[in-house]
Structure formats: structure tokens, C-alpha cells
Image (cartoon, coloured by chain):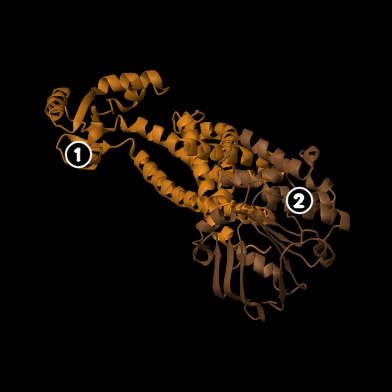
């Protein structure tokens, strides 16, 4: 599903963020991306989301070389990917329902009934169905994070990327969220989670890609 | 068919939601629309004034006419013969002959100088011909006048409406000038709209970034901003109409005074729906264009910084 072939990324005027990275993630797999902060985890996720382009090497996602996309194709590509950040980037002038509905509005292929149905299903998944009319400001950190996840999965993406999704949460909440990712993986979504929460990882039997100073170890 | 329906729905959604966005910040909206509206008021008033002047000069051009004073010794019979002769000329619409005795009689009735004839002993007034030229032959008037002036029977030729031509050319100059000023003011409106949209983009930076991240196309992000510009233009046009109406209302008495001195009838206060519609359409298009230019310039600069 996701294949890196000798990918390097160098930001202008800085040392290499990634050097000669190669790996392959099968469709429907779930993987942890580990390493210290600054090891290149975020850069790797950005490359997959086509927020950055590699300086060298090739990235194939679902059989397509994503480096070859024209600017017009990129939005359509991103719709196949759900992204969860440490800071969920919710829009504060809209309520929870509108925030989660955003990916569906963007594709413009759903009727209002369909949007309502899907948004409520996603909110139900993260157990925040009762908050649909609340504004994000009134939610706790964990709730916001779960809204971010609901938004990432509402359009049923093929790939789910998460960058430190449990970074701000206590252990119990972190585990709960991780279980959510496992659930999505079980319905066939390819999941890649970047984290340095080693305590959490050790409890799970999930393959890891470890980055150290921009290289796979 | 289904795609078309969705596309339409998306436009309607953007259209309505931008209106909602404007009303959520009524003061900002009002101030921006007021700046643009006030700027558009001057061109709108100029447009309105042209129309009034046009009506006025259309009224004149129906009857371009001048007076031919005949020499003292010309008899009535000579004058009438010449009138018949002149009548055949293609340039002339019709000729009225005014007998000097009748003229004196009219003069006596209309003035206090009842005994003018008694003072001079004779009738001092000449026979005269009032020549009305066909309106299509307006430009041939000077030539015709020059020709008539040389005629043996003629003492002098006076064109009563010469000042109208001078006024016309003055108005023409002012019209040109106003067009240029209006052009500049339209550019000002474009800049105001452009700046408003630029600020809106800055304010919505986070939202735009999130949308891009979620796979929004450039069009999806641009659409509400461009509609925003169009709405602002529309409201500016409405305000410009109100401000123009106010200005006309305030100016009407003064204009009526001036017009009365020239014995002109100006229908100064008249409602012209076509012109209002034109103003609204133009200001909406200006808003649309300004927003479009701003969006093209600034939206590209927003890079994803997540």
C-alpha cells in the first residue's frame, strides 16, 4: 500500500531529515513509527500525505508514484488519507458536527442526509455523539483529540496517519484511543502511527519502524 | 445529472453561507460596504446627471431656430415672396413671418412703453422671419446663417440659442472628465475589495490550511471568498443608490433654482430602475473581480505549515 524506495529528504540549509529510507507497508497493516523527537517521524508522515516532496527516491501509494501528481491531483489524493495530529486543528467557529462534516463537504459528493448519517456514525465510534452541537472550545483535550479522529475517518479513508495522537493524554485515555485505531485497522484501513510513547507500544503486539537520525534502524 | 445537482448544491451552499458569514459581523460588513458605496456614489451621481442633461439637450435639439431681421425698407410683399422662396430649401423645416405692425402691437401690449411709436414717429421695428431648421440639419446652421446674412434684404441674423451650443460642449467636456474619474474610482473599489479579501484570507488562514489538508480543491477554498466579494459589491451598490438618492434630494432645490433662471425644465428627481440595476450589476461585478484578483494573488501563498 505504502512503499518507500530510498527516500531522502533534506530541508534547505539543514541536515537531512531522512536518509535513504526504504520500507513497505502492506494493505490493511498497522504499524508504529517510533524514534526520538527529531528523528524524522513527522517528515515521513508529511511525505506520505504529500505535504512535502522527497529530495530523492520514490514513494508509491496504492500503486501510484505520488511525486508525479500535479497540483490538481493532490487534493483528490489527500481525500484517501485520514490524518490525526497531536493538535487536532479543529475550527473553533464551527460546532463539533460541522467540524467532522468538513471532509464530506469538501468532496461535495454527499447529500445532507448522507452527511448527517456518516457524521453521527463517526461520532458514535469515538463515543461523542452527545457533543455534536458543542463548540470545540468547550471540550477537554481528550475529547478534542477524538473529534479529530472522527473527522479523519468520516470519509472512510484507505490510509490513516497519526502523528503523536496520544501525546497530550493520560495513559488510560491513550489506550482508549489506540484501541480506536486498532478497530479501524480491523475493518481494513492501513494505519501508521508515529509515537514516542514506548510504554504504550510495549503493551501491543504491533510491528514497528524505528527511525534514528533520519535512518531506519 | 447527479454530479450536476451536487455542483449546484455546493454553489448554493457557498452562496448562502457567505451571506450568513457577512451578517455574523454586521459592523465590519457595513463599514466595508460603506467605503465602497460612498466611492461608487460619485460615479452614480455623474451617470444620473448625464441622463438629466441628455434629456435637456434632447429637448432643445427638436427645434433649432434663429431670427432673421429684415432691412427697414423691405416691404411685406418682398418679405413674403422671399419666405416662399426660402421654404423650398431642404435644410429648413418651416418659416414664420412676423409683420412689423403686429410686432409693434404685441410690443405695446406687453410693455409699458405704449407710446414708442409716438416718440419716434415711425415704427422702429423691422419685419422678421423666424426660421426653424430641421433637427437633422443642425450642423448646417452656421453655413445657412452666413448665407442669409449676405442677402440684400437682410439686416442681421441672430441665433437665439447659441449659448446652448456652448453649454453643450462644456457638458461634453465634463462628461469626459467624469468618465475618467469614474474609471479611477472603480479601481479604488477594486482595491478596497481586494484588501478586504486579503484580510479575510489572513483571518481564515488556519481554516484554509485545515481544508487543504483534508483535500479541498483550490476552487472549494476560493468559492466562498469570491462570493464574499460579490456580496460586498452588491451591498455597496445598494448603499450607493441610497447615498445618491440622498444627494439628489439635497441638491434638487438648488438645481431647480438654476434651471428656472435659464427657463429650463429639468426633471431632476426621477426614478430610473434600469440605471439602478446597472449600478447594482456593475458594483457586484467589481466585487467579484476584486475578490478574484485577491484570491489569485494571496491564496497561493498559503503553504501548509502543519
Residue A91 shows in this picture: no
The chain letter under disc 1 is B
Badge 2 density bin: few <14, some 14–19, many ≥20, Cα 10 Å: some
Between B83 and B78, the one nearer to me in the picture: B83
Chain letter matching colour orange:
B
Badge 1 density bin: few <14, some 14–19, many ≥20, Cα 10 Å: few
Quadrant that contains the C terminus of chain A: bottom right
Quadrant assignment, res B243? top right
Chain letter matching colour brown:
A
For label 1, the SS is helix
Residue B143 shows in this picture: yes
Q: Write down the residue under mark 2.
A: A180
Q: Write down the residue under mark 1.
A: B144
The vertical placement of A171 against B122, above or below, is below
For label 2, the SS is helix
Where does the image place residue B49, in percent across and percent down from the top left? 47, 38
Number of numbered callouts drawn: 2
Residue at x-position 39% and y-position 45%: B172
The chain letter under disc 2 is A
Between A186 and B20, the one nearer to me in the picture: A186
Q: Are marks 2 and 1 on the same chain?
A: no
Between B114 and A126, the one nearer to me in the picture: A126
Residue at x-position 52% and y-position 43%: B283
Amino acid at each position: 500500500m505504502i512503499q518507500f524506495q530510498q527516500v531522502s529528504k533534506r530541508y534547505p540549509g539543514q541536515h537531512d531529515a531522512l536518509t535513504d529510507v526504504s520500507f513497505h507497508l502492506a494493505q490493511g497493516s498497522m504499524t508504529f513509527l517510533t524514534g526520538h523527537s527529531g528523528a524524522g517521524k513527522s517528515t515521513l508522515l508529511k511525505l506520505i500525505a504529500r505535504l512535502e516532496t522527497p529530495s530523492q527516491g520514490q514513494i508509491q501509494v496504492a500503486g501510484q508514484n505520488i511525486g508525479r501528481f500535479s497540483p490538481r491531483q493532490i487534493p483528490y489524493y489527500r481525500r484517501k488519507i485520514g490524518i490525526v495530529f497531536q493538535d487536532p486543528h479543529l475550527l473553533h467557529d464551527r460546532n463539533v458536527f460541522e467540524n467532522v462534516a468538513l471532509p464530506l463537504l469538501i468532496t461535495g459528493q454527499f447529500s445532507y442526509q448522507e452527511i448527517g448519517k456518516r457524521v453521527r456514525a463517526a461520532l458514535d465510534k469515538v463515543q461523542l455523539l452527545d457533543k455534536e452541537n458543542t463548540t470545540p472550545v468547550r471540550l477537554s483535550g481528550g475529547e478534542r483529540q477524538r473529534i479529530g479522529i472522527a473527522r479523519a475517518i468520516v470519509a472512510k479513508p484507505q490510509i490513516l496517519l497519526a502523528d503523536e495522537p496520544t501525546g497530550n493524554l493520560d495513559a488510560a485515555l491513550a489506550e482508549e484511543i489506540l484501541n480506536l485505531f486498532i478497530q479501524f485497522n480491523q475493518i481494513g484501513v492501513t494505519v501508521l502511527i508515529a509515537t514516542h510513547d514506548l510504554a504504550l507500544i510495549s503493551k501491543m503486539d504491533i510491528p514497528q519502524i524505528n527511525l534514528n537520525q533520519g535512518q531506519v534502524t | 445529472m447527479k454530479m450536476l445537482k451536487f455542483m449546484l448544491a455546493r454553489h448554493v451552499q457557498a452562496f448562502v453561507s457567505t451571506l450568513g458569514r457577512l451578517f455574523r459581523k454586521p459592523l465590519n460588513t457595513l463599514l466595508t460596504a460603506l467605503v465602497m458605496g460612498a466611492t461608487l456614489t460619485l460615479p452614480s451621481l455623474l451617470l444620473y446627471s448625464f441622463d438629466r442633461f441628455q434629456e435637456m439637450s434632447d429637448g432643445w435639439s427638436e427645434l433649432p431656430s434663429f431670427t432673421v431681421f429684415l432691412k427697414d425698407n423691405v416691404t411685406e410683399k418682398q418679405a413674403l415672396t422671399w419666405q416662399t422662396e426660402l421654404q423650398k430649401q431642404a435644410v429648413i423645416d418651416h418659416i414664420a413671418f412676423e409683420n412689423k405692425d403686429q410686432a409693434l402691437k404685441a410690443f405695446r401690449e406687453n410693455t409699458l412703453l405704449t407710446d414708442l411709436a409716438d416718440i419716434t414717429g415711425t415704427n422702429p421695428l423691422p419685419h422678421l422671419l423666424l426660421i426653424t431648421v430641421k433637427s437633422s440639419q443642425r450642423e448646417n446652421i452656421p453655413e445657412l446663417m452666413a448665407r442669409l446674412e449676405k442677402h440684400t434684404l437682410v439686416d442681421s441674423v441672430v441665433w437665439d440659442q447659441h449659448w446652448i451650443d456652448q453649454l453643450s460642449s462644456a457638458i461634453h467636456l465634463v462628461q469626459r472628465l467624469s468618465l475618467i474619474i469614474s474609471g479611477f474610482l472603480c479601481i479604488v473599489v477594486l482595491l478596497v475589495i481586494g484588501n478586504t479579501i486579503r484580510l479575510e484570507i489572513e483571518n481564515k488562514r488556519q481554516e484554509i490550511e485545515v481544508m487543504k489538508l483534508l483535500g479541498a480543491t483550490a476552487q472549494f477554498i476560493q468559492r466562498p471568498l469570491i462570493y464574499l466579494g460579490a456580496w460586498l459589491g452588491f451591498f455597496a451598490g445598494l448603499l450607493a443608490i441610497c447615498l445618491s438618492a440622498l444627494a439628489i434630494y439635497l441638491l434638487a432645490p438648488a438645481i431647480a433654482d438654476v434651471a428656472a433662471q435659464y427657463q429650463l425644465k429639468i426633471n431632476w428627481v426621477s426614478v430610473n430602475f434600469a440605471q439602478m440595476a446597472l449600478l447594482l450589476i456593475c458594483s457586484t461585478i467589481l466585487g467579484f473581480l476584486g475578490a478574484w484578483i485577491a484570491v489569485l494573488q494571496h491564496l497561493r501563498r498559503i503553504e501548509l505549515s502543519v
